[in-house]
Image (tube, helix red, strand yellow):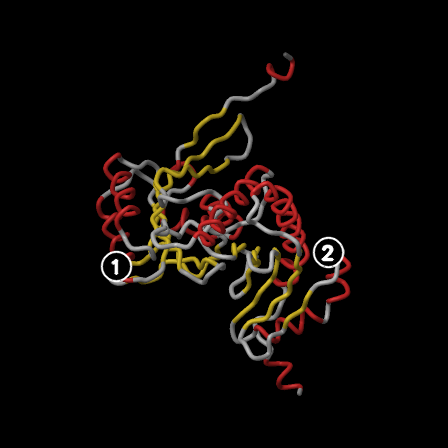
Amino acid sequence: MTIANELGRLEKVELRDVWASESSDFTPWLAQETNIELLADTLGLDMEVEAQEMGVGPYRADIVCKDVSDGSLVLIENQLEKTDHSHLGQLLTYAAGLDAVTIVWIAERFTDEHRAAMDWLNENTGESVSFFGLEIQLWRIGESPIAPKFNVVSKPNDWIKGGSGGAKNTSLENISPTKLLQRDYWIAFREVLAARSSNLKVHKANPQHWLTVSIGRANFNMSATVNTNQNRIAVEVYMNGPLAKQHFHRLKEQQVEIETEIGIGLDWRELPEKDTSRILIVRNNSSIKESECWAQQHQWLADTLEKFNKVFRPRISQLPVSYESEVEEA
């Protein structure tokens, strides 16, 4: 009873009381790292800002981000009032002029017509474009600092928070029973992660032998994999791109520390004949054909992925963007 009497009351704050101008106040605020992270968490994406006021055809996108999981673009258009036809037209221009993009429309309020338009676009546009509509609100309790809140009002049809927002429904026609089994396995695994409130950012559950997990940097990802022929599951960090081998060698220098923190030896695969390298751990005797075994397997995958994320993420974020100095020294 005493605690209940001490509870405060939420009070809504007008957006214009905090941001007088969209371009001069709100957009620079949203582009700050901590604030774009708040938006990214709401969308279930892992993204970083590339530019502000970037030209796209005859228009300029307020903020352009990169989805670090696959390098695709995330375009953000802002409004500090209710949605209008002009901004909708800009979104359509972005969709027509770019491939593989996620388009985010943020406004104080979405009209029913524009919400319906966003839903229609998600149902009828190609697989490479996804549309999100978000309303932004400001709240405070008493004299507390003002807190922003994003509310998703329109989203891709198969969007699940914590998953890749950019993917569309995959047709299940002509897919083999094994692929369908893999899809069901990953759907169930995503539900396990959601139930344990995992901070892992996993992609859509597709009918394939792997599930991708973002690790915060372009050309790097984690993944959980299944091998239905050899009855094994695995967790790995993989890297590609022109610096993959240098990155791999830099991480290999820390092998002892990394394996000590993870608590087990890892399989380090440079793969010199390929443009990728991998670091993985395998769990044998793990058939996914018996669903009664899934709970134990999913627990191992979740525990291992979270441990990999904790150990590898900070090291990967600190890897150089260039190794030119080392080449010059040599």
The residue tagged 1 is 96
Q: Residue furthest top?
A: 1
Q: Position of residue 236 (x, y in %)?
A: 61, 60
Amino acid type for the residue under numbered disc 1: Ala
Q: Position of residue 185 (x, y in %)?
A: 52, 47
Q: Position of residue 180 (x, y in %)?
A: 44, 50
Name the residue: 55% across, 45% down. Answer: 189
The residue tagged 2 is 262
Against 232, residue 219 (above or below) is below
Name the residue: 46% across, 61% down. Answer: 70
Quarter occupied by residue 294: top right
Which element type, helix, strand or loop, lies under badge 2?
Answer: helix
Q: Position of residue 244 (x, y in %)?
A: 57, 73
| Label annotation for residue 129 | none
Locate the N terminus by quadrant. Answer: top right
| Mark 2 Cα-neighbour bin, 10 Å: few <14, some 14–19, many ≥20 | some
- Mark 2 or mark 1: name the one nearer the start of the chain: 1
Amino acid type for the residue under numbered disc 2: Ile
Residue 39 appears left or right of 87:
right
Front-most of residues 245 and 211 = 211
Which tag is nearer the camera, tag 2 or tag 1? 2
Which element type, helix, strand or loop, lies under badge 1?
Answer: helix
Quarter occupied by residue 213: bottom right
